[in-house]
Amino acid sequence: MASQRKLDTEFSVHDAISPISPLSSWTISMFSDHYAASEKYSPYSDKLSPQSLLQAKPWPSRPQKLHKGLGGYRWWESTVDVIMILIPLPFFILGAAVIAVNGKVVEGRELDILQQSIKGATTLFPISFAAITGRAAVKYATWKLEQGTTLGTLEQLMGSRTVASTFVTQVQLRSFNLIGLGLLLVWSLSPIGGQAILHILYTPEKFTTSDANITYFNSRQQSYSAPAGPFQNQWYPGFTVLFGSSLLAPTPVKKSSMDIWGNVKIPYYSSLDSNAPKDKEGWIQVSEANTSLTYSSLFGIPLFGLEFGNTTLNIESSYIELSCSNMSTTPILETPTKELIKTDIISTAGPFVSFENASDHTSWSIGYKGEDVTAVRDSDNSTYMYPQFCPDCLPSNFANVSFPPGMLAFQEYIGFDSATSIFCEPSQIYVESTIFCDRNSGSQHCEVTAQRPSLLPHLPSEITYLSFPQVALGVSALLPNSTPNFGAVNQFQNYLYDPLSQTNIISGSNSLSSDGFSSRLQSVPLKAFGDRLGQMLNAYIYSSMWNATTYITGASFTGIENNLVGGNNASFIPADIADLTAMIQNRTAAFTVSAAQINESQVYFAFFPWLITFLISNFVMLLAAIVGVYYSRRTIVPDYLGFVSSLAKESPFIRMPDVGVNMDGMDKARMVKEMKVRLGDVSDIENGKAQVGRLAFARMEETSPVKKGRLYV
């Protein structure tokens, strides 16, 4: 057999074809003749003949045992297994991150990271799903092939390595069974899971509540009011400027819940609707529609620490309220010098004590008559320290001491002939107010929304700041000089007449220029007079507290720490009721309280239906990775399915060794990747052309191109 001897240059035909091959004897004979002919006409040189091409690669030289498992696995196969298991983990981390931020306020850098991660995951998820699930299908199909299965099952599995091919394969095979249904369900999670990622996180605008710490100025601390002394320059020059500005403020500001500098004004508790219902804790809601609402001072309470958004807090405060009655007009007494206006009501000698007597250019004066609380204090065994001028500066046992109410007298001089006198009884009122502030980038608005009498310990209302002689004398000496007197114009008096008329305050004539018989005060109701005088008196008292004018204009409270006077510092630790009581008695200048802050801001919103869909899809991908690893370890045959080299090895028209059974299809492909092949006609042999062509997968030089219209088998 010449042809067989010709083939023996490397190995015989029967060496190339396994003895257990089902090829017929005709096929073997045909292959022997055909291969001999192809050797004769091969375009390869001796150096690049098919035999030398195969021998140039490191094919195993002898038969091998089938083995895989942990001992037989190569490092790159184990690496691929580990990578397949790890790929789903970043997607789980993304899902966990979305759950972790759900409901939190959006932070710029954090949001950017999440958005970039979601965009990346949307792109990578379908790719990862296809890689892992497609590998699992091949590994499972290889295991099924090793165990024995139908060609239909193998075609279903091998044809289901992408989303589109899965659907097409089931339709083409007409295999609508459980395997096909399972494959369709699994692969449908690839696009669904990828799209779900885009919808797992939103950032809607929402109101969020958080805790805040707000510091506010203590209006119950000691006053440094005195007709003269070293402390006067700390506050009085600033007060006169702020006081004049407040008197001349536009009408909307005077009616507003805030002063010119944005400090919240405290209303008189008595101005609230007396018929308004109280809740079980004694709170009365302050309605903006309450036209009778009157504020207790020209100056508001400074707040520090307000952030953007809505803030609600409760503050403690105190003010003097005047109850006025008995308006009368009496003649002015003659004096020898004619330089002083002498009355038998207000003077340095009393009965209503003033720091100085009125002069011929004095349009009004004020005096106080009442018990000297410091005289009672001096009889105590403990030491009284200046300038502890405040009701809360007194020991708590003063609550058991009976004090008659004091009386404040106000006199307006009508020309040089008569004086109109009004007498007011002062009361120290202690209230707790609920403050609501709305702050944004352009403005801030604060107002009292509810009020009730203070629940903290305090002395009887008869003990006021005016119960301290130095404070009362300071009022009589400094308050009349707090506004400039432009000849016939006195802004203080004009505010008492009509506080909402700018024309009146700026250009209204004072009482000294009147005809000597009528006073403009006579047209002012006593209630309105008491409220207006109280507003200016309380502004004076507030300003006389240590460096108050600085903080009224917006200075940071941190400066209080650098200006300590007799323990008059600030607390920046949130205080409860017990702490507030102690700090008031210690004359702490500013308190810090807890507040509820509500912001309309972007928050993270995890859309759980889509998030659960994404996590289920990712979990299925993880299961697919585990399935791929599991069946890869259980299978001992090499990877055969899906490789062209495996098809070539089984072709009787391509000469390849039978050895190398442990080599995967990709290993074999690397060995013969330079070989040229074609699916063509192998019937064109040396002796002529057959009438019917034979279609086969063979080396390119051993085939001829197929022709349209020819018959093939």
Image: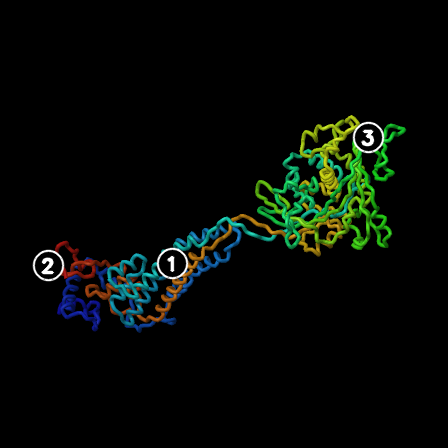
Q: Earlier in the sequence, mark 2 or mark 1?
A: 1
Mark 2 highlights which residue? 689
User: Which one is earlier in the sequence, the residue at label 1 or at label 3?
Assistant: 1
Q: Is residue 573 above or below residue 133?
A: above
Instruction: Inspect the image, locate mark 3, and give the three-letter code of the amino acid beneath it.
Output: Ser
**Is residue 175 placed above or below 356 in the rendered structure?**
below
Q: Secondary structure at mark 1?
A: helix
- Residue 309 at what x, y percent from top left? 57, 47
Q: Is residue 580 shown left or right of residue 408? A: left
Residue 467 or residue 330, whichever sits in front = 330
Q: Dot 2, how many residues are within 10 Å of its Cα: few (below 14), some (14-19), or many (20+)?
A: few
Position of residue 200 relative to residue 478, above or below, is below
Q: CA distance from mark 1 to mark 3?
A: 100 Å
Mark found first going from the N terminus, 2 or 3: 3
Q: What residue is pinned by disc 3?
A: 418
Secondary element at tag 3? strand
Residue 100 image position (x, y, % from top left):
50, 57
Mark 2 to mark 1 CA distance (whole Å): 51 Å
Quadrant for the N terminus in the image? bottom left
As drawn, the label of residue 128 is: 1
Q: Are marks 1 and 3 in contact (CB under 8 Å)?
A: no
Amino acid tagged 2: Lys
> Is any atom of residue 328 visible in this view?
yes
Q: Nearer the viewer, residue 272 or 678?
A: 272
Towards the viewer: 108 or 537:
537
Q: Position of residue 285 (x, y in %)?
A: 63, 48
